[in-house]
Structures are given as structure tokens and as C-alpha cells.
Amino acid sequence: MKHFITIIIGLFSMLYAMCQAYCTVTTYDEDSGLSQRLVKGIVQDNAGYIWIGTWNGLNRFDGKEFVALRPDYTDEAFRYSNRISDLHLSPKGNLLCRIDDRISLFDVNTFHFTDLHSQIEEAIGQEFVLSRNLPTRSGEIVLATKDGKYIVIPDEDHVAGAKLVDQLPKLQYRPRTGRRIDATGPYAADDIAMSQMDSLGTLWIVTRDGAIVSSPGKDGPFTVRERIDVVPGSLYYCTTDNSGNVWLRSSEGAHRVVLGQRPYSTVATHDNTQVREAMTDSSGRIWLSESDALAVAVMDTDTGSKKYLGSDGRLSDTFTPFGTGIYAIAESRDGTIWLGSKPSGAFRLTPSGDNTYEISEFKIGNVYDFLFDSKGGLWIATMGGGVMYCPDPSARTPRFKSLSDMRGYPANAQRIRHLAVSGDTMLLGATTAGLLAVDMREISSADSLRASLLVSRPGVAASLGNIAVMDVTVAADGSILVATESDGVNVATPAAIDRPDDWIFKHFNASSGLTDVAHAVADAGSSLPGWYVVTSENRIFLFNPSTGRKTVFGRWFWDDRLRFTDAHPVMTADGRWLLSHDNGAVMVRLDTTVHHSVVPPVLFTAVSVQGAPERLLSADVDSIVLAKHERNLTVRFAALDYSGSNDIDYFVKLGEDDWVSLGHQNSLTLLDLDPGEYTLAVRASTPAGNIIDNTDTITIIVTPTFWETTTAKVLYVLAILIMVGACVGTVVYIRAIKRKQREILNAYLSVVKSTSRPAADSDEHVRESAPEREVEKLPLSDEDKALMENVAAFVTEHIADPSVTVDDMASAVAISRSSLNRKMKSIMGVSPAEFIRESRLHKAEVMLAQTDRSIKEIAYDCGFADINYFGKAFKASRGVTPGAYRKSELK
């Protein structure tokens, strides 16, 4: 019966430890961003923002940042000071602020203060001094005046209907503080700022002196869990937010208090020493190495009681040092316990009686880990001596073989932290210089071995991310998970386990939402298939490498500032995990813990355009409009969670793009936006890293300049078409002019050619009159025709004279040289000199084709004094020499 009662007491003590009451306090003051520490009111609005009234204005808090708001010159309340002495939520979700004994209304959407006091005085026809605001449940606003009267306002939009009454209206009022006011235990009613009973029946009391007290019931015992550092008697309850955080105020700031039950139990150690290593034995007990105390404890998981192993092999109920620091603990199939120490080597504990062991010591260096293979062989990781193998660990005198003495063992693989095995084929070692892979087959008889040291290879992204390997674990599907010191967890799924140099690693680190510093990695057990426990500096992760999903147990979960060690996590028979930290250990279930029951809303909180100061966004804003000259903006957002806001991850997407992770960053900058409409979506995780459905969207409208509008684009097209049309028209016109000039030129050249042709019969003369008839048809004025007839006559008469000049021609037609040049250019497109040359060449063509005179004679007859010049001029104009031309005409 005595033993049964002991077990029952132990079970209840364990249940109480797992449900131990705890509280945390966070104080916000000027150092936190609050505009002033003298806080006079705290409320939560309908959107989820926390508003804090101080003697230096209002403060809006989104869990990450405070923004101070005060009446400005555009507000009716600008005439008052910024001393807010009371703060309440109005029936329509705005804020009723008492400022200098006057009532003002702050609109949470427009961020403006309205002088409600003056409007009420006008409505009731007299002045009054505000005493306090009495919030109702029915929607009316009731104000108490200092002369003992009351003002009833239907609602904030109908101030004109305000009435002054002598008696307190019979309405349903909200309690001033939300607290119990009756005396409880040793605390008088006036000493209590608030009290509440939680879901497990724990009574919580917060005194006005700052003591936070818990009790399993109304009758005690009462235990002070925490103290808020305030002036005695100055602490007041304000509100409890949507997540259950209690908000109190004092002259020292705003205080957020979390009251609850610790979701884990603590494992105390001697002098709060860290747990270096732990192991669950075949009977369900947990062996703990309290290495700094040179002690080994054996804990009963049912009762939580511990016994200490002495150097004589006996387990004692009182603290007894073992005498050396233990770094590794393992159990063989026959129940033998192996302890690895630094610097004393290995100890074998063979059961010899009730709570008694026979101890054998083996001086084999600094032992950091043990691993038993399927054949019963013992593999030993040492710090400085590489890997050792013992084929007969149960022998009276075991044999230890050092792999580092064998050919093929990597020289740098001497400092081994942990071991793992893959299929009884490949031994894996976490070393300070990389991941060791050793072929285990026939290792006991061979003098050489096949081994590789996998390291980080420059330029190879799929290689190991960091050579400082902390731990290694083999998954059920054969994947290899490697915990590294600065690249998180690297995962390899080998196609061939015996070719480690071909393994491809996938990296999960801080950039993918995990952690860079991974101390250890362990399979999460059958209740969470495919998931792994990853320990880090101050966080524990549940991690699924197949999906990339994770759950983070961070500061929001641990009420203490825990710093976890590199000890391997250990699962107990009931599914709890023992996690070691600098001052002991904790035990917790990671698979069934409820992380967050409230989904925090995500809201866009502020925007900065073109680098201008940020302006606040209200909860109901759905769009941001950028002016014509604005193209850049930074938008800020927040998940309104006040317990673990620093652990929340944010994700954004623009339009139909994919979601992009921003990590803990809660702002996004968009640059050089083109005109148009964009939909920006943002969502957040819980502090535990779980993605939830809390997406918020906002439309960004970029106004185009006139030159970017559709009208301007149409004008651009029209202008281009006009320019193209003008160019085409000009080209056509110029070509028409040139064609006309060419026709006129050819006509007069024909006249010159016909009149200079050799004489023939009368019929020939009749035919030669045709050019003159063509000239008559030319579209020229009579004056121009007369001029050209004189020019043609002059050229015909002097065509054989090489000394004739343009001046002679001008004198002959009775106009100046310049006028003649201008006229002929306009009519025929050629100068007088060019006309003379063309006329001579035309005559030469006729003579070459119709006479048998020599080329030299023809040149002289056509006015060319130099036979060579004639040849060059003829070829330049006709493309062939005079001789070639004659031959072509005679064929």
C-alpha cells in the first residue's frame, strides 16, 4: 500500500509539473517606443490594434511598433493638451479620450480628433466638466460630470441628441476594470487590480502593488509567481486582448501579462548544471549526464525522482558524484550500460544487483558517442582519436580497434561528435571537419577500409553546406539528415549508399525558415512520420524535409530564456521529449501541443511613397493611389499577435506571382512601378511557423502621366502616321519634280540632237520635226519656253566650240549668269554647264551610232578639245567607252 501511495503521489506530482502555473510580464515604456511611460488607458479596437493613452498622446501598437498620434492643427481638439487621462472604446469602434477634463473622439480610420465636448455643450446648452466616461453595453455614451449629473448621448454620430439628466440612467454598463472586486484569500478588494480563474481551475490575482499570484483554488495556497516593478498601489487593469493577454497600466508603462499553464515540465539538476547527454534505457528510465557536476543521474519518468550513480556502481537517493564528466550514454541488448567520458575513456556498467552495477573502465580517449550495430559490435566516437570499433563489448577484456590506424581512413576525421548507421552497411560520423562515411563490411578483419570525408566543395551547391557537423541521423526511407553548425540541416537521399562522394545534399537553413545553427536532429517518432526534431540555440523545430513545413517552439513557447545544448534529444516511452539546456532539461510533448487557438489578423499598417515619411493606414483601407510623379513605395504590415510577434514569418505576392517569403521582415519596397493596378497580398504564419488563412490584400493604383495615357498613345500613333505620310508625300513630290525636270531635259536634248544631226533626205527632216512638237507640249510658261528655245539654239550653234562658256550663253539669252543658272536648275534640274555637256554627249551618241567617223573626229565635232577627257566623260555618263558604245549600236 505504501508503494502504491508513492506511485499515486508521483503521478500527481508529474501531472502538476506538466500543468505548472506560470506567467510572463512584458513592460513597454519609452525604451520600447511608447511616447511616454505614464499610461492612463489601454483598449483593443475592433480590428485588433492595441491603443495606449498617455500624457503624451495616443499610441497605436501592432505587436511590433508603436506609432504616436496627437491632435494637429487641422483637428478641433488641437486647442487642448496631449494629456490623455482616460481611454474607452466607443460603441462604433472609435476612441473616447478624456483630455484635460474634456471629452474628445478619435476616429481610428481617419486618425483625427473631434472636439466632442464643445458639440455636447452646444447640444445641452451649458458647459460642463467631465468626471468620467461610463461605457454601456447598449450603444449609448454616458458621461458623468463633476457636479454629479449625467449626459446621455444616443451615439457618437448623433451628439445633437445629447440630454442632461440628474440620475444615472438605468442602462447596462460595462465594468470599469473587468476584475473581481471581492476580497480573495489574504488580499483585500482594494488591493486587487484583477483576478481570474483559468480553464484548469487555477486562480490568478494581480495586486495593485505588482504581485502576480496563483493558487489551485480560492482557499490557497497562494504563490507569488512574478512581480511587476511599479510604485505600490499604482497598477490598474485595463483590458484582456483577443489572445488572452492581460494589459495593465501604471506610471511605469504598459504591462502585458501572459497567465497560463506551462506546456512542459522542468527537470532540475544539481546546482542547475546542464545536461550533457541523456538516454532512455530498456526499463523506461532516463539516464542523465550532469557533466559539470561530474554526476550521472537515473530518473524515473513516472515519479520524476532521481538516483545518482556513485563511482562504486551504486545508485543513491542523494546526490553523489560519479567523479568524471560523462559525454555519451548507451545500452546494449543485454542491458549493459556504457558511459563515455572525457578524459577517462569508457565505462561498462554490468548489472550486479538491485540498483547496483559492476564498473569496468577502459582508457580509450575522450569518448563522445556509442553505437551498437545489428551484430552487437560497438562503434565508438572519440574526440581526437577518430572512430574505434569493439567487436566483443561483452567480453571480459574487450578488443578495441582504431579505424584511424587503418589505410584509407581520412586523416582529418579525428574529432567525432556523433555516429549513425545506414543499413548496417555505412557508418556515418559527425566530425568537426565534415561528414565521415565508412564502409562497415568486413571491418574487423581488413587492414584497409573504404572511407570518405564529405566536405563543402567550392562551386558545388549540392555539396555539404558546412564542414562543422554537429549530428547525423538516418531516416526510415534511407535519407541522411546532417545537422551543421552554420548551414542548418542538410538532407541527402543517396541513390547508392556505398558511393558517398556522389551524394547530393539539399540545404534547409535560415533562408528557408529553419535555422543556421542546428545542434542535433532526431526522428520525431511514429506519431509524426516524416518529421524530425531539430534543436538550436534557443528554439526547437519540428521539421518535415519532404514538404519543407515546420513548427517552431521559440520564445513565445518557453516562458524561460532557455539555451539548448548539443545533447541529442531523447524520447520517452510516453511520447515526451527530453531536451537539454544550460541549466537542466525540459520534458514536453511536441506532437499534441496546441500552439495557437486564435488566428491573428494581418493588416497593412503604413505606407511611405517616394521616400516620404510613413503615413498610417486604417484597418479598412483597400487601396493606395500613387500620383502621376510617384512610382516607388514601401508598405508595412503586421499580424496582430502580441505574444510572439518577433517569431512570425511573412509572405507576399504581387498579382499572379508566386508567394515570396520575407522571413520576419514586415515591410516590402516596390520600385519603378509602371502605370496600372496591382494587387498586393500578404499573409503570415503563427509564431510557431504554421501557415494560416489570414491573407489580406490591397490594391495599388499607379496613376499615369498624360504621356502614359491611352489618349497620348493614340496621339503618338497619329503623329507617327502623319510624319510617315509627310515623308512619303515629300519623297513622291520630289520624285515627280525630278521626273518632270528629266522629261524637259530629255526633250530639249532631243531638240539639240535633232538640229545637230547630219543632213539626209526630206523625209528625214520631216521626222526630225517631232522633238519640236514634243517641246510644244511641255508644261512650261511662254517665258520659260522662250528662254529654253534660245538656250537650245545657242547650244546647237556652238556645240562644236570647246571654248564656249556659260557667260557666253547668258549673254546670248540676255539674262545674268546667276538667273540663267537658277532658271535652268528649276526647269530641268541641271546647270547650264551640265546642259552643254549633256548636249555634246547626246550628239556624240548619234554620231557614234549613225556615222563612221573616228572617235577623235566626233569628239572634236562635239566640242571636246581633249580626246581623253571625252572618253572619261562619256563612260561616266553612259557607263561604257565610246568605242564599246559604237559596237553595241552596230550589232
Image (tube, rainbow, N blue to C red):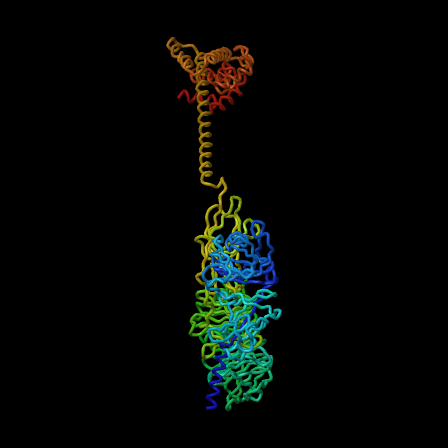
Q: Is residue 833 placed above or below 139 in the rendered structure?
A: above
Q: Is residue 451 placed above or below 94 in the rendered structure?
A: below
Could you say which is closer to the camera, residue 693 or residue 251? Answer: 251
Could you say which is closer to the camera, residue 103 or residue 667? Answer: 103
Q: Which quadrant holds residue 254?
A: bottom right
Q: Is residue 737 visible?
A: yes
Query: In the rendering, at what x and y percent does residue 407 appear?
Result: 54, 74
The single residue placed furthest to the front in the displayed view is 166
Query: In the rendering, at what x and y percent does residue 530 appear?
Result: 43, 70
The single residue placed furthest to the left in the displayed view is 763
Q: Is residue 276 visible?
A: no
Q: Which quadrant holds residue 40?
A: bottom right
Could you say which is closer to the camera, residue 769 or residue 75? Answer: 75
Could you say which is closer to the camera, residue 635 or residue 98? Answer: 98
Query: In the rendering, at what x and y percent does residue 825 appear?
Result: 50, 19
Q: Quadrant of the C terminus?
A: top left
Query: In the rendering, at what x and y percent does residue 115 appear?
Result: 55, 53
Count of numbered tags: 0
State the residue at coordinates (46%, 27%): 730
